[in-house]
Amino acid sequence: MARFAAGVVVVTTLGDGGSPRGFTASSFCSVSLRPPLVLVCLAKSADSFATFASCGRFAVSVLGPEHRPLAERFATKGADKFAADGLSRTPGGLPAVAGALVELDCDMYARHPAGDHTILIGRVSGARLSEGAGTPMVYYERSFRFLA
């Protein structure tokens, strides 16, 4: 699967007491247009797994090349992912990546166990596009890469 290029997103939510939680994912795609559904896969071993196993909403930020440091930070187990700048809030109050190519607010629609991961399906309740087309970041051969 390392030979399959995939887009890179940061997925975020708020846990108990309003503490922000999040992770980097390359397993993200559109599922349905009616209703608008997206999916993302989360490892059961992830630091944020328990929060996403019970949250009612989450945000997805589609990343560009300038977001590489954030992608690396949110992919690092044990890192303080919300310690530095580069973050903002969605209109619904969820943490998100500032200047993301696309920012989605999602209501949890379903969760499905799948081996050592859980598939989170969200119903898109809001979407925002960045200015201009932007260049996406991709994950290929276990490395973040950029399209020319």
Image (cartoon, grey):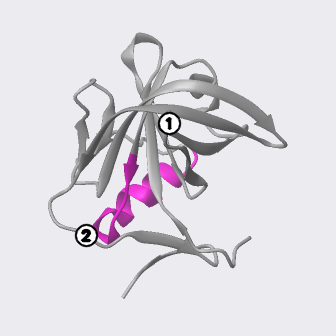
- Residue at 69% x, 79% y: name it: 3
Q: CA distance from mark 2 to mark 1?
A: 26 Å
Towards the viewer: 71 or 126: 126
- Judged left or right of residue 121, residue 98 is left
- Residue at 62% x, 35% y: name it: 120
Identify the residue at the far top of this view: 17
Pointer 1 residue:
34
- Name the amino acid type tagged 2: Gly
Which mark's residue is nearer the viewer, 2 or 1?
A: 1
Nearest to N terminus: mark 2 or mark 1:
1
Q: Where 105 sits versus 14, above or below?
A: below
Q: Where 83 sits versus 18, above or below?
A: below
- Residue at 57% x, 27% y: name it: 52
- Name the amino acid type tagged 1: Arg
x, y percent for residue 102: 31, 52
| Quadrant for the C terminus in the image | bottom left
Q: Are marks 2 and 1 in contact (CB under 8 Å)?
A: no
| Quadrant for the N terminus in the image | bottom right
Disc number for residue 134 = 2
**In terms of image quadrants, where is residue 66?**
bottom left
The magenta region covers 61-77
